[in-house]
């Protein structure tokens, strides 16, 4: 086993590309170290990306925000402009684990761990976030929902690494929100979750919508039918009822130690309604 | 020794105050040494290989590759722990549980172990051990295990306690029965009868410190063991017996203990560590991972309980009956029996019958968990009591008060009660402001009562007075939550000196006589009795020395407020001698001054509690929130009231976790799905409100200060109190613990659909 | 496997050690440096008993590699008291009996210290959520929360 701490993205990509055995990228380590401890992974190479230039920074650009791959979630919560623009993304990121885990875990790691129940992913998908991927054959920018392809699997090729997550600049009358269901008040993995991002017109009519559900299928679900049910409407009771029904119907959950199929279906709809109400309010709707 | 343990009704100077505990500074600075904080020169790392199967024959174990790995110093299997139990069936089970002999009986059952120079080598060595299993059908559910077609866990099990010896083996090791009167007749006089079936899932004590020990066996047959345990003397006996050592040559030191709650009363890793050390010829440190703690230490029973209670219109219970089925893991236990004894202990009943069945399953060996077996029985009984009160149309507190046991009542499990606290806790609950506080939408209030026996047992204390007048108190009951502070208070009280003059420690097994372990709420009860006795013995010597110093007859010397006083007008000129003054002269008056005590602390008073709680239920998701919680419990006498409150609060919190979210979840493959704190969900800080406590003091007549055990009773009522609150909030009767959100939501939905 | 040479600062003192790539900071503190105040309750970041502060961030030392401490500043329970003077939180934990078995106490104290440094006047709810990453099985948290509240008051007065 080797541990390296490259200072440039080129070095990181180069080492990963030429690694012979299993290689692991270390940012916050809150998934990797647990998996190593349990004997589920035994990497030959650990690439610590925290000291690569720019990886630990949040930068506000003309287009929006660029969140380096090694930025701990706690730092997202301390960034006033990001919090104001994307409160749903930040609240989702701030729900991962404890204060202790917050100081380490990253939204990029959360995405690449590819758990169906990842907290920040539904919020990122709803937000239309993009991932900047660096690899042996150059860089590409992809929609975050294309990164996880199944539980524990991603679309990233050997040697590829996400260097940052991009979030758009916000127009007027925009709001997002995220909620998850957990049995306790903290420290749990989402049993089911929902992230919704809305923009409204001046009259409070929903112009655009993205609705994402977590822990409801092998990967986070982007429910387009739910978005369509919202667009062109305000959040009246009928719309909310349709939203819940569509979200419950869109779920393809499993029975497991955290919840039942029935429970996840029902609560997905309940959460979608509650999240929509918060996002709508944040967008200035009444 | 003629020690008089009777309650004397004295006025206290030290007892009842709240000083800082003697081990406190060590614990806030990180200096206190727990099981895993101790090291020996040349120490190896021990690790255990565990069965991935719930039930399998071990056909062959090949350790040759592991033995050849560089850095591996010993590999052991059951062969290295030969059977020395000499027909003691209970100890044979302990041995088999430490290291599976012919069959792996649960997911996590130890099958081999290694000692190596470091953790990485030990881990690699485990991977090189080849075990050939023949997987057998398994059963983990209590009711399924009782079916006649269920896989048999032990073919030699024939149910005990039946009128006729059964001809076929089964998974039921024992049937037990308690009660009096005629329940059939009693139900005939009832105007209302509630009959319900309940289930509770298996929970774990959830102590934060995993089991840990350092074992060192020497070539001369002596050995040392450093270990986190609730009873180092018991561990010594068990380890000595299993390893073939002489007990006095095995010195066991109890480390600071990071929680036990009954879970550190059995040996698991310790005999294995000793066997590894013996084979390797070096000290071995063995620390369980959290995964191992869940899979392979001793959780409580899963249960299935039927309850039937009948009452007249006026609220008098006419008959009560319960059938209780408790899992004991793959080895025989007496858990259902205890449940059957406690089930109706709170009530005065003319006709009562309880039957318990001990059931074998492919789960880890059940261990005690704080008032073991009582919370599940109380959940079933107190739920039915609440429902019956509702049906009769009587207030649930009044209903319980009307039927509460009292002094002179013949308990449902046999003995006649002395002065007890069930009535007073109910009256206190009735008058508590909590009972009248308004509730909001979706909130419900529940209450329930609980009972626990408490235990006394063998106890031994040494009290040594230094020449500077400071006092060291060596006790043998492990301090799990502040008992060194309580015992120091008791010694200070009896000697009439200041608390700050004392230092209490827990002595190792070679420094003090035998002590039973800290269980059965006996730590402060029994060791305070022995401390009082030891102090009184020391006072006899102090008086004698003062008499020598004054040259007066010892019978004229009394002991008062830390001083020897020469009694009588003729000694008018003699100023009292302080303990310090007498101690300073001890070298000239007969040598060191000490008091010893060896006794069996009989007469542990039974204990009762009543809890009240408010729960809010989200009707759309089944989520629950504990809004308010109040514990009322009888302490006999609270020696250190802050730590008594702590016991009340801690037990309530554990009960809340049990009631709402904690459970062992087994997959269809018989493997534990949630062996970690992520998915075995004990309450976190934000889950709980402040937990209010009210200490009642109904003196125990069998203790000089009136002390009763306080540690366990607080976990008995919460399951039922919360179930009653949830049922009141959600409008559905919950009969399955834990009341996790999916279960509550399913119940609400079922009710909506009718 | 060659050891990694690490140079770091622990409780204000420069420390150098060698560690393996898969060794956690918790392993290093406990097994190499003899700082056993941080405890391993789970090894998976779920109990908080191993809490330390690294460069001003509260973390579980079981989820940090020893190698990652290079050039960082690590604070552990062993550095919380100054000479003979206990930290107000340590004092208040003792006075309130905010510990029974005490195994979780070092983690709670470190987490509470971090909490009060970032928020000197927390509400009860902020304390409860701020300490949700630290499990205690003995106390029901009541006396811990009260001790933190009392320490906050004392520290503001100081």
Image (cartoon, grey):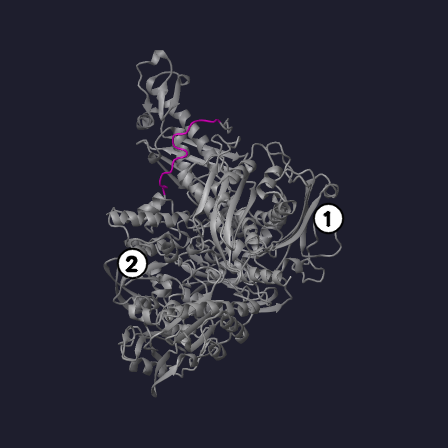
For label 2, the residue is: C118
Residue B1 location in percent, x, y? 50, 28
Q: How many marks?
A: 2
Residue C153 location in percent, x, y? 29, 48
Q: Which mark is residue C88?
A: none
Q: Is residue B323 magenta?
A: no
Residue B194 lies, with reference to residue B330, above or below; the image says: above
For label 1, the residue is: B162
Q: Main secondary structure of the magenta part?
A: loop
Residue at x 42% of width, y 37% of height: B487
Residue closest to the eye, C67 or B407: B407
| The quarter of the displayed image where residue C5 is located | bottom left
Residue interval drawn in magenta: B8-22
Q: Quadrant of the N terminus of chain A?
A: bottom left
Residue closest to the eye, B134 or B528: B528
Helix, strand or loop for disc 1? loop
Residue B651 lies, with reference to residue A260, above or below; the image says: above
Q: Quadrant of the C terminus of chain A?
A: bottom left
Q: Chain of mark 2?
A: C
Q: Estimate how packed mark 1 is, as few (under 14), some (14 to 19) or many (20 or more) residues with alpha carbons within 10 Å.
A: few
Residue B695 lies, with reference to residue B570, above or below; the image says: below
CA distance separating discs 2 and 1: 66 Å
In this view, which residue lies farthest toward the front?
A203
Q: Is residue B622 left or right of residue C154?
A: right
Residue closest to the eye, B160 or B193: B193
């Amino acid at each position: 086993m080797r541990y390296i701490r490259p200072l440039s993205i080129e070095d990181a990509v180069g080492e990963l590309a030429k690694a012979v055995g299993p290689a692991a990228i270390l940012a916050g380590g809150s998934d990797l170290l647990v998996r190593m401890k349990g004997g589920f992974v035994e990497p030959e190479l650990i690439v610590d990306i925290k000291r690569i230039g720019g990886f630990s920074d949040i930068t506000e650009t003309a287009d929006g925000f660029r969140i380096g791959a090694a930025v701990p979630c706690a730092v997202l919560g301390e960034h006033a402009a990001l919090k104001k623009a994307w409160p749903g993304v930040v609240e989702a990121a701030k729900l991962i684990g404890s204060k202790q885990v917050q100081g380490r875990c990253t939204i990029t790691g959360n995405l690449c761990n590819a758990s169906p129940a990842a907290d920040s992913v539904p919020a990122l998908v709803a937000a239309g976030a993009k991932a900047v991927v660096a690899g042996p054959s150059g860089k590409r920018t992809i929609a975050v929902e294309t990164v996880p392809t199944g539980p524990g699997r991603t679309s990233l090729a050997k040697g590829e690494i996400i260097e940052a997550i991009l979030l758009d600049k916000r127009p007027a009358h925009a709001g997002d929100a995220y909620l998850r269901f957990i049995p306790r008040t903290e420290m749990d993995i989402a049993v089911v979750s929902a992230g919704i991002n809305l923009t409204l017109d001046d009259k409070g009519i929903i112009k655009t919508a993205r609705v994402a559900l977590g822990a409801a299928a092998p990967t986070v679900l982007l429910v387009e039918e739910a978005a369509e049910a919202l667009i062109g409407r305000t959040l009246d009771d009928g719309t909310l009822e349709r939203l819940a029904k569509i979200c419950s119907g869109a779920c393809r959950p499993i029975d497991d130690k955290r919840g039942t199929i029935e429970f996840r279906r029902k609560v997905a709809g309940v959460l979608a309604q509650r999240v929509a109400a918060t996002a709508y309010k944040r967008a200035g709707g009444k | 020794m003629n020690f008089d343990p009777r309650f004397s009704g004295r006025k206290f100077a030290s007892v009842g105050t709240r000083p800082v505990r003697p081990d406190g500074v060590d614990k806030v600075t990180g200096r206190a040494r727990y099981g895993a904080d101790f090291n020996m020169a040349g120490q190896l790392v021990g690790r255990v290989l565990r069965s991935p199967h719930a039930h399998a024959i071990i056909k062959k174990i090949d350790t040759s590759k592991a033995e050849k790995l560089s850095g591996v110093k010993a590999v052991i299997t059951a062969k290295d722990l030969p059977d020395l139990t000499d027909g003691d069936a209970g100890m044979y089970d302990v041995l088999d549980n430490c290291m599976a002999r012919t069959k792996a009986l649960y997911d996590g059952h130890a099958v081999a172990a290694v000692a190596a120079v470091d953790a990485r080598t030990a881990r690699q060595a485990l991977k090189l051990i080849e075990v050939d299993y023949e997987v057998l059908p398994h059963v983990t559910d209590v009711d399924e295990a009782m079916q006649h077609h269920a896989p048999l866990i032990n073919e030699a099990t024939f149910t005990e306690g039946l009128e006729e010896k059964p001809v076929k083996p089964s998974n039921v090791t024992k049937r037990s029965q308690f009660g009096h009167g005629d329940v059939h007749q009693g139900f005939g006089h009832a105007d209302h009868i509630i009959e319900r079936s309940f289930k509770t899932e298996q929970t774990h004590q959830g102590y934060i410190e995993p089991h840990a020990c350092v074992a060192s066996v020497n070539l001369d047959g002596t050995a040392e063991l450093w270990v986190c345990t609730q009873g180092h003397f018991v561990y010594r006996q068990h380890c000595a017996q299993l390893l073939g050592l002489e007990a006095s040559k095995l010195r066991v030191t109890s480390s600071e203990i990071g929680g036990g709650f009954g879970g550190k009363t059995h040996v698991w890793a310790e005999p294995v560590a000793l066997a590894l050390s013996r084979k390797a010829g070096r000290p071995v440190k063995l620390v369980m991972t959290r995964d191992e703690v869940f899979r392979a230490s001793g959780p409580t029973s899963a249960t299935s309980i039927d309850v039937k209670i009948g009452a007249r219109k006026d609220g008098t219970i006419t008959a009560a009956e319960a059938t209780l089925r408790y899992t004991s893991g793959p080895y025989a236990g007496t858990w259902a029996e205890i449940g059957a004894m406690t089930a109706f202990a709170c009530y005065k009943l003319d006709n009562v019958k309880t039957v318990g069945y001990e059931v074998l399953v492919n789960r880890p060996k059940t261990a005690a968990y704080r008032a073991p077996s009582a919370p599940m029985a109380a959940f079933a009984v107190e739920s039915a009591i609440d429902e019956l009160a509702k049906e009769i149309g009587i207030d649930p507190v009044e209903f319980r008060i009307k039927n509460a046991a009292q002094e002179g009542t013949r308990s449902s499990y046999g003995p006649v009660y002395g002065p007890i606290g069930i009535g007073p806790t109910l009256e206190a609950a009735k008058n508590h402001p909590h009972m009248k506080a308004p509730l909001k939408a979706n909130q419900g209030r529940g209450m329930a009562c609980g009972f626990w026996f408490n235990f006394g047992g063998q106890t031994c204390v040494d009290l040594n007075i230094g020449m500077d007048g400071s006092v060291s108190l060596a006790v043998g009951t492990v301090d799990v939550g502040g008992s060194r502070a309580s015992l120091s208070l008791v010694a200070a009280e009896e000697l009439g000196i200041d608390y700050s003059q004392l230092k209490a420690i827990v002595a190792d097994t070679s420094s003090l006589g035998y002590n039973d372990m800290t269980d059965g709420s006996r730590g402060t009860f029994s060791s305070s009795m022995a401390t009082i006795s030891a102090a009184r013995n020391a006072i006899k010597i102090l008086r004698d020395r003062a008499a020598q110093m004054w040259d007066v007859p010892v019978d004229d010397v009394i002991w008062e407020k830390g001083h020897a006083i020469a009694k009588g007008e003729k000694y008018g000129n003699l100023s009292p001698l302080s303990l310090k003054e007498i101690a300073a002269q001890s070298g000239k008056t007969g040598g060191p001054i000490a008091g010893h005590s060896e006794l069996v602390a009989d007469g542990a008073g039974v204990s009762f509690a009543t809890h009240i709680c408010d729960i809010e239920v989200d009707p759309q998701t089944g989520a629950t929130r504990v809004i308010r919680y109040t514990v009322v419990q009888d302490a006999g006498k609270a020696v250190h009231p802050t730590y008594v409150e702590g016991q009340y609060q801690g037990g309530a919190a554990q009960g809340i976790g049990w009631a709402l979210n904690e459970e062992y979840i087994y997959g269809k493959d018989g493997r534990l799905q949630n062996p970690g704190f992520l998915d075995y969900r004990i309450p976190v800080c934000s889950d709980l409100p402040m937990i209010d406590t009210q200490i009642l003091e109904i003196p125990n007549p069998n203790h000089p200060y009136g002390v009763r055990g306080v540690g366990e009773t607080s976990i008995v009522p919460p399951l039922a109190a919360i179930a009653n609150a949830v049922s009141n909030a959600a409008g559905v009767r919950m009969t399955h613990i834990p009341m996790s959100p999916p279960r509550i939501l399913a119940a609400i939905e079922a009710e909506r659909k009718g | 496997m060659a050891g990694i040479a690490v140079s770091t600062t622990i409780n204000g003192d420069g420390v150098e050690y060698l560690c393996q790539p898969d060794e956690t900071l918790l392993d290093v503190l406990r097994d190499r440096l003899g700082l056993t105040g941080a405890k391993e309750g789970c090894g998976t970041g779920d109990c908080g008993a191993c809490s330390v502060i690294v460069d001003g961030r509260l973390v579980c030392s079981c989820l940090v590699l020893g190698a990652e401490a290079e050039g960082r500043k690590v604070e552990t329970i062993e550095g919380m008291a100054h000479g003979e003077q206990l930290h107000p939180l340590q004092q208040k934990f003792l006075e309130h009996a905010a510990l029974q078995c005490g195994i979780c106490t070092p983690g709670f104290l470190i987490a509470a210290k971090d909490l009060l440094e970032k928020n000197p006047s927390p509400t009860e709810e902020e304390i409860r959520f701020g300490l949700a990453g630290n499990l205690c099985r003995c106390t029901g948290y009541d006396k811990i929360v009260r001790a933190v509240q009392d320490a906050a008051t004392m520290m503001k007065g100081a």
